[in-house]
Image (tube, rainbow, N blue to C red):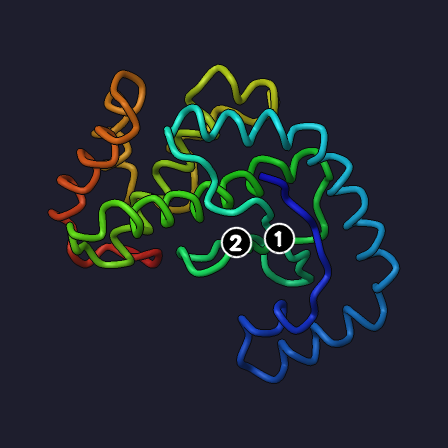
Amino acid sequence: MKLHFVINKEIDESFVKDKKTLNFIDDQYKNSGKFLELTKDLYQKSWNQINNEFSDYVEKRTGYKWFYDDYECIISVIHKGISNWGSAPRIVRAWKENPYSMRRITAHELILSHYFEIYLRNYKDDKIKKEQIWALAEIAAFALTSLTSEVRNFWPWDIEYYTNHNYPHIVGIQDQLKNTFLKKSFDEYIKEGIKIIKNFPNISPSGK
């Protein structure tokens, strides 16, 4: 898997509906174009230092190869992080970040996409809602980017956050799944997660 950082104003705007924000985005692209390009290059250089090792790590830990050879990361002037829910090999990340500290959240968004692809291709007969898949994907992304020894190779300064995040309503489920993640296969982890998440039919990014 290779991740390519790109600038695409049309995609950046596609997540926004109100005119005030669209005008802000337009101004940012007009006034900061050269800095967006510089950011793109800095992000790419930093990511390239871990791309192959990270790609192999995720395949080894999940037991699933990446479903696409190439992924895009749109550098956004407004969005901190967006992951597709199994619809395209594309994520979105904010542009005003340190090119090294941006790695973890970028990896998180990639893993979210990967988990959705795994579920939709292999577990869709369980028929849980997309919001429930989202919760399990988030939990898996937090686990894969913080609980293993390998992540110290990618962002050693930023690994103490497994349950320290802005989704407090999934922490209880994370606690239930932690040992399964550490001691069982990833497929067993997915199955246990599906079993647990069925008790939370109304879970969503905004709350339970």
Give the side of residue 101 with respect to residue 109, left or right.
Answer: right
The quadrant the C terminus occupies is bottom left
Q: Extreme right residue here? A: 34
User: Where residue 62 appears, x then y in whole percent?
Assistant: 38, 30
Give the side of residue 79 with respect to residue 29, left or right.
Answer: left
The quadrant the N terminus occupies is top right
Residue in the foreground of this view, choosing between 162 and 196: 196
Amino acid at the residue labelled 1: Glu
- Residue at 73% x, 39% y is 99
Residue in the foreground of this view, choosing between 158 and 150: 150
User: Where residue 117 appears, x then y in whole percent?
Assistant: 38, 49
User: Where residue 32 appears, x then y in whole percent?
Assistant: 83, 64
Q: Quick check: 28 above or below 1?
A: below
Q: Quick check: 48 above or below 73?
A: above
Looking at the rendered structure, which numbered label has been put on residue 176? none
Q: Quick check: 77 above or below 200?
A: below
The image quadrant that residue 140 belongs to is top left
- Residue at 26% x, 31% y is 187
Amino acid at the residue labelled 2: Pro
User: Where residue 205 appears, x then y in whole percent?
Assistant: 35, 56
Q: Are marks 2 and 1 in contact (CB under 8 Å)?
A: yes
Report the residue marked by disc 2.
89
Mark 2 burial class by Cα count in 10 Å: few <14, some 14-19, many 20+: many
Mark 1 burial class by Cα count in 10 Å: few <14, some 14-19, many 20+: some
Report the residue marked by disc 1.
72
Badge 2 or badge 1: first in the primary sequence: 1
- What number of labels is visible? 2
The image quadrant that residue 18 belongs to is bottom right
